[in-house]
Amino acid sequence: MIKHTFLVFLCALGLIINPVLADDGYDQDTVLDDAADFFGEGAEGLGEVVEKIFKKYGRPNAVIKGEEASGALGVGARYGHGFLSMKKGSKTEVHWTGPSIGFDAGANASKVYVLVYHLPNTDALFQRFPAVDGSLYVIGGISANYHQSDKIILAPMRLGAGLRAGVNVGYMKYTREKTWNPF
């Protein structure tokens, strides 16, 4: 009798706790559907990219959807804007800029879908994130990389068009207001 009561108690506790844990972040299917809708046609390989990021980091607690343009000839700059959506409901406009240096030449315009991990609150996004990027755009392509500052991890996925090839290092600075200064 005691075993049975204890088992029923554990099952009931699991039903209470499980929905709370399941709401910790965006699930993979939701992200994949949302990203596919956002990118539209031409998002081939998106499922593999999302699956790889989820295997590495799990469920994001926020996403950023936006667009950006960048260019480089050894030294480069990136400018973007979009909206940060926290899993718990808040939505905030964000802008980002960043300088880069490396073996990099060309220009591209991209739609950007960023998975955000361990973001404690909206204000924590507004800082610099070190970045290493490798790109090869010949007409179009999808790419993903990672940026990390302390425990916050950003995994931007870009689907863009242009003519660009190279590898560079720099940082991305997220701000509330638009700026033309990449530093």
Image: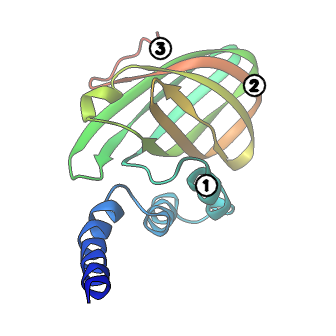
Q: Residues within 10 Å of mark 2 (few under 14, many from 20)?
A: some
| The residue positioned farthest toward the left in the image shown | 90
Calculate the distance from the C-alpha at mark 1 to the C-alpha at mark 3. 32 Å
Looking at the picture, how far across and down is residue 89, in whole percent? 21, 52
Q: Quadrant of the N terminus?
A: bottom left
Calculate the distance from the C-alpha at mark 2 to the C-alpha at mark 3. 18 Å
Residue on which disc 3 sits:
182
Label 2 or label 3, whichever lies nearer to me, is: 2
Q: Where is residue 16, by image quadrant?
A: bottom left
**Disc 1 or 2, which lies upstream in sequence?**
1
- 131 or 150: nearer the eye? 150
Looking at the picture, how far across and down is residue 109, in whole percent? 57, 39
Q: Which amino acid type is shown beneath numbered disc 3?
A: Pro
- The structure residue drawn at horizontal position 38% and vertical position 19%, both measured from the top left corner, is 127
Residue on which disc 1 sits:
55
- The structure residue drawn at horizontal position 72% and vertical position 35%, both measured from the top left corner, is 135
**Disc 2 or 3, which lies upstream in sequence?**
2
Looking at the picture, how far across and down is residue 110, in whole percent? 55, 42
- Residue 139 versus residue 146 in the image, above or below: below
Q: Is residue 36 left or right of residue 75?
A: left
Label 1 or label 3, whichever lies nearer to me, is: 1
Q: Which amino acid type is shown beneath numbered disc 1?
A: Lys
Per the image, label 1 sits on a secondary structure element best described as helix
Q: Which amino acid type is shown beneath numbered disc 2?
A: Val
**Disc 1 or 3, which lies upstream in sequence?**
1
Looking at the picture, how far across and down is residue 128, in whole percent? 44, 18
Q: Is residue 49 left or right of residue 63?
A: right
The answer to whether mark 2 and mark 3 are in CB contact below 8 A is no
Q: Residues within 10 Å of mark 1 (few under 14, many from 20)?
A: few
The answer to whether mark 1 and mark 3 are in CB contact below 8 A is no
Calculate the distance from the C-alpha at mark 1 to the C-alpha at mark 2. 25 Å
Residue on which disc 2 sits:
167
